[in-house]
Image (cartoon, rainbow, N blue to C red):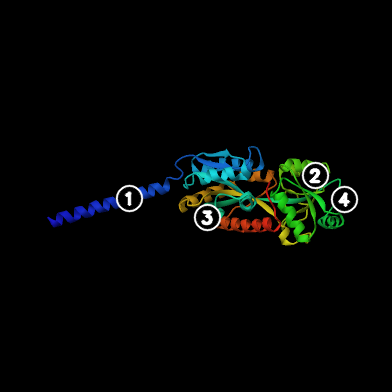
Amino acid sequence: MNATTLPRRFVTRLALVLVCATLAAGSAQAFPDKPLTLVVGFSAGGAADTVARALAEEMSKSLGQRVIVDNKAGASGNLATMAVLNAPADGHTLLFAAIHLATNPSLIGTSYQPLTDLQMVSQVTSVPVLMLASTKSPLNSPADVIAASKKQEGGLKVGSGGIGTSSHLGAELFARSQGIPFLHVPYKGGPPANQALLGGEIDLMFDLMSGALKGFVDAGRVRPLAVMQENRIEALPDVKSAKEWGLPASTQLRSWQGIAVKAGTPAPVLAQLHTAVVAAANTTTVRARIAQLGSELVTSKSPAEFQQHYAAELQRWTALVKAANIKAE
């Protein structure tokens, strides 16, 4: 009797183990089991939206599920961030991450903890920042800007797309590194600031590279003085870098874009998303979109690498906002 009962119990237990293992394997392989949503905190039609949509289309092909772009502009990107944080941490809701995730906490405050509530997946682009002068001004180099700022009471008029934007922070970095004053003129967005520069209403602007800006430069409507990073960029190969001009590393600035998810997303899902994002970013279609915008393709070796980059950016901009006493409107 025992000889018959023991094998039967063994077989039953073995069967249960095999069933559980099969279910676990099936669960791990199920992702994604429905369409994904890529939440973008910017309006449709802009540079961020352009990159996001190209990326989503290519990711859909490799993941075997649609990646739907959902634009939730408002609250400096916080609406989009909270939409992702309020969704399950299962990898089906993605966030189009950008530099505002590193500036918002100190500028306007957030109801979430940046480094513990958000998990970066991979960077996708690096967006160069240009120092631009009005063609109505005599400024032809960073040295000219420094000299003119020291001579003019209150400093030069420097425009930006708004308080706390990359264009504002770029001006703060440069001015603080040189100990020079400047009169900050914030506009409601980049386009109005660009028009002010074209019309000579402001002397200088630090602006993100874009297709529209390249058009202004190529047409001779604005004067590029420097690319605020170590190296020149392919879109404007004749414009010297900040390093070439001998400017300190503290003046260097690049905006960035990538993909993030809610913290707690399972590691296998995170790894699968990283693979999909990097593969999509390296397709001919996405590369072309990024190049058209004047940005540079930059992907992360791992989610951990992008998380470290985010932490460094968060620390850098928090320190600058506090030191310069920048207050969001």
Element marked by disc 2: helix
Say which of 310 and 289 sits in front.
Answer: 310
Pointer 4 or 3: first along the chain: 3
Outermost residue on the top side: it is: 44
Please give the residue where the numbered disc 2 appears in the rendered image.
197
Pointer 2 or 4: first along the chain: 4
Q: CA distance from mark 2 to mark 4?
A: 13 Å
Element marked by disc 1: helix
Please give the residue where the numbered disc 1 appears in the rendered image.
20
Q: CA distance from mark 3 to mark 1?
A: 32 Å
Pointer 2 or 1: first along the chain: 1
Say which of 172 and 11 sits in front.
Answer: 172
Labelled pair 3, 1 in contact (Cβ < 8 Å): no
Instruction: Give the residue type that dot 4 points to.
Output: Pro
Q: CA distance from mark 2 to mark 1?
A: 66 Å
Q: Residue at x 55, y 42 (%)?
A: 38
